[in-house]
Image: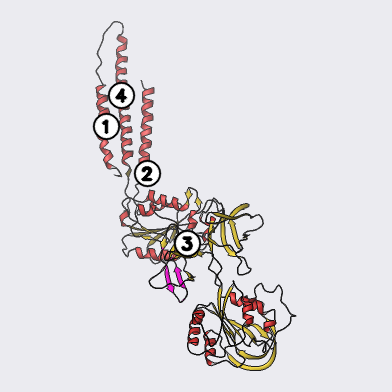
């Protein structure tokens, strides 16, 4: 037997005190003789003997009671017959994803798991701690107390790989691996340690009640380019929560409030009319007592910027000016012999209006823009397609043999399923005034046409966001500019260049964000919020900067992109809503995997010292028992 607090055993020397007190009380009897009591002599001797026995019994029980109390405070234990804690290599994985906010039998799952580890951790043993976003080769109690929720999802394959690096090749030491997680359904349990002598323990921590309401996503409702109406999707798990209030804010300003009733179906959608509203620090909020992180969804909506379009013309461009009005579009028109290269390089859409060929610096500039995700709309000249223009077409992915045809053709076919005509037609129109052309190019390609002639040859094709007409659109050659079809066709080709920033991005993922700003010199962009500022990875282009966010930021919320001291863009980040799914995978228990019910069960397995909360309870019990015996002796023995 060994003791946790052996210094307490010095108190045993104090047991001499009750012995001395007892001896002082054992005084001798003095004899007194008087008549007619001779028959009492024998009774007196017996009474004196019984009294002495009673006092020794009382003394014994008191000494035993005090001894048991002293032993209890010394906390005795029997050392394990197996290896001690220092010869056990222990790796503990704690899932600190946001789904661990769920409430278990004894509180929040993550906080309770950390508390159990702190209470059970051997004082003379070391453990390696792995979380979703950090590693501690020799974890201290302070490391455990500082575990916070992370947006990095649980990845057991990576966790097993990391743990494998911490276990040594020493075959004389025991190796134990404990995994604490809620083990959601999207987790796959790998078998990395099959060939090693590693004891694997799973501790599933589950929500006591799977009831949870979450804001699943938010998106713009379909409509005009300047529409900022928002649709919010909510869902629940567990019992039907009934009616739930939903609020929308810009910072602390309440923009709207509604409610959703899950009685009909799950999920449910709400629409908030925010027509032409700028919401830089938006958030959708509900009240729910289960998981807290999915009660708020942050979003940002900035001003809709005009789309910059440059038209390079060898023909009349009046129809283009009518099709691209301000303020939605900023159209700059120029003849093909008077090129404003500054306007061209800053464009989001470039229209080549019957330009026969490209020469010199114009060909180089347009080739550079072709690699910079600029939308090209190419209307060929009825005279022919020169080698410079043909080279640009091939660079845009519009490749195929072209043959000039002087034959009247009608445009009769429309690909209604193409994204260019989303929400344009209420039904598939069959009888309308077909536009016609006189001279066209028979373009043989594998690309499916958006508009086609009566002989099924292509009139308008699209590839990788670029558009090519196979005929000139001037009034002499075509009636397409008088057709109602031209308005949605060119309008949607123009707005296809508008890539609105996302309402929000997900934490823990690689996000590529284009910031429409020009910076020079040593300037860099920063991302800032009320609590943190960091510099993301960034790539500078001619008229924009692409920033990449991965590990940062760590917290959900609204952020600003800062150029120097000036905010240029708002961003919002949220936790992936997969964490809201309170569906769990069952862990199969086999010879390689053992499933535990709590953390103390892990530290009670072979290899750890059996020294906690066992023998001291027995000594307390014996102390109480001796107290009861002493009471009975004093009461019933005379």
Residue bearing the label numbered 4: 55
For label 2, the crowd category at 10 Å Cα-Cα, with few meaning under 14, some 14 to 19 and many 20 or more, is few
Quarter that holds the C terminus: top left
Q: Earlier in the sequence, mark 4 or mark 1?
A: 1
The answer to the question of whether label 1 and label 2 lie on touching residues, with beta carbons closer than 8 A, is no
**Distance Cα–Cα, label 3 vs label 4:** 82 Å
Instruction: Name the disc covering residue 559, or none.
Output: 3
Q: Which residue is depicted at the point 29% across and 20% down?
A: 49
In the image, 618 versus 41, the foreground residue is 618
Q: Secondary structure at mark 4?
A: helix
Q: Is residue 258 visible?
A: yes
Residue bearing the label numbered 1: 15
Q: Which residue is depicted at the point 25% across and 37% down?
A: 10
Tell which residue pokes out farthest to the right in this image: 431
Residue 345 to residue 245: above or below:
below
The answer to the question of whether label 3 and label 4 lie on touching residues, with beta carbons closer than 8 A, is no
């Amino acid at each position: 037997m060994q003791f946790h607090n052996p210094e307490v055993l010095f108190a045993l020397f104090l047991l001499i005190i009750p012995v001395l007190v007892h001896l002082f009380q054992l005084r001798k009897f003095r004899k007194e003789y008087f008549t007619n009591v001779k028959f009492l002599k024998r009774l007196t001797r017996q009474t004196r003997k019984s009294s002495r026995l009673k006092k020794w019994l009382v003394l014994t029980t008191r000494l035993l009671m005090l001894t048991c109390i002293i032993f209890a405070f010394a906390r005795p234990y029997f050392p394990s017959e197996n290896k001690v804690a220092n010869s056990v290599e222990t790796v503990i994985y704690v899932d600190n994803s946001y789904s661990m906010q769920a409430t278990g039998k004894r509180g929040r799952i993550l906080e309770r798991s950390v508390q159990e580890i702190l209470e059970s951790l051997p004082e003379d043993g070391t453990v390696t701690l792995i979380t979703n976003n950090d590693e501690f080769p020799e974890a201290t109690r302070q490391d455990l107390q500082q575990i916070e929720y992370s947006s990095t999802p649980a990845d057991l394959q990576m966790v097993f790989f990391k743990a494998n690096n911490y276990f040594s090749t020493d075959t004389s030491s025991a190796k134990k691996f404990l995994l604490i997680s809620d083990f959601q359904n999207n987790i796959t349990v790998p078998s990395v340690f099959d060939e090693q002598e590693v004891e694997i323990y799973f501790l599933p921590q589950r929500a006591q009640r799977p009831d949870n309401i979450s804001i699943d996503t938010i998106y713009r409702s379909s409509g005009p380019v300047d529409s900022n109406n928002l649709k919010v999707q909510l869902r629940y798990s567990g019992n039907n929560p009934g009616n739930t209030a939903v609020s929308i804010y810009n910072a602390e300003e309440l923009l709207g409030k509604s409610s959703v009733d899950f009685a009909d179906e799950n999920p449910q959608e709400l629409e908030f009319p925010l027509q032409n509203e700028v919401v830089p620090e938006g958030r959708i909020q509900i009240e729910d007592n289960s998981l807290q992180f999915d009660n708020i969804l942050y979003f940002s909506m900035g001003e809709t910027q005009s789309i910059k379009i440059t038209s390079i013309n060898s023909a009349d461009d009046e129809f283009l000016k009518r099709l691209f009005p301000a303020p939605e579009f900023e159209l700059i028109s120029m003849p093909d012999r008077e090129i404003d290269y500054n306007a061209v390089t800053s464009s989001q859409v470039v229209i080549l209006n019957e330009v026969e060929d490209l020469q010199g610096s114009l060909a180089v500039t347009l080739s550079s823009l072709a690699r910079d995700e600029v939308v090209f709309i190419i209307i060929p000249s009825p005279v022919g397609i020169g080698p410079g223009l043909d080279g640009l077409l091939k660079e845009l992915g519009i490749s195929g043999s072209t043959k000039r045809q002087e034959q009247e053709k009608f445009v009769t076919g429309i690909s209604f399923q193409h994204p260019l005509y989303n929400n344009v037609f209420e039904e598939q129109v069959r009888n309308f005034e077909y536009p016609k052309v006189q001279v066209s190019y028979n373009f043989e390609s594998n690309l499916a046409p958006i508009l086609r002639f009566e002989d099924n040859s292509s009139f308008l094709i699209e590839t990788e966001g670029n558009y090519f007409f196979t005929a000139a659109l001037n009034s002499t050659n075509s009636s397409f500019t008088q057709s109602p079809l031209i308005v949605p066709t060119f309008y949607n080709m123009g707005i296809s260049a508008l890539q609105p920033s996302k309402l929000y991005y997900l934490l823990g993922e690689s996000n590529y964000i284009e910031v429409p700003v020009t910076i020079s010199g040593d300037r860099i962009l920063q991302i800032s919020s009320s609590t943190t500022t960091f510099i993301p990875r960034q790539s500078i282009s001619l008229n924009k900067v692409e920033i990449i966010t991965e590990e940062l930021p760590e917290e959900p919320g609204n952020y600003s992109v800062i150029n120097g001291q000036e905010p240029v863009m708002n961003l919002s980040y949220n936790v992936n809503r997969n964490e809201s799914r309170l569906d769990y995978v069952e862990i199969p228990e086999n010879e390689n995997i053992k499933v535990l019910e709590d953390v103390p069960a892990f530290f009670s397995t072979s290899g750890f010292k059996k020294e906690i909360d066992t023998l001291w309870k027995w000594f307390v019990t014996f102390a109480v028992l001796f107290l009861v015996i002493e009471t009975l002796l004093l009461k019933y023995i005379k």
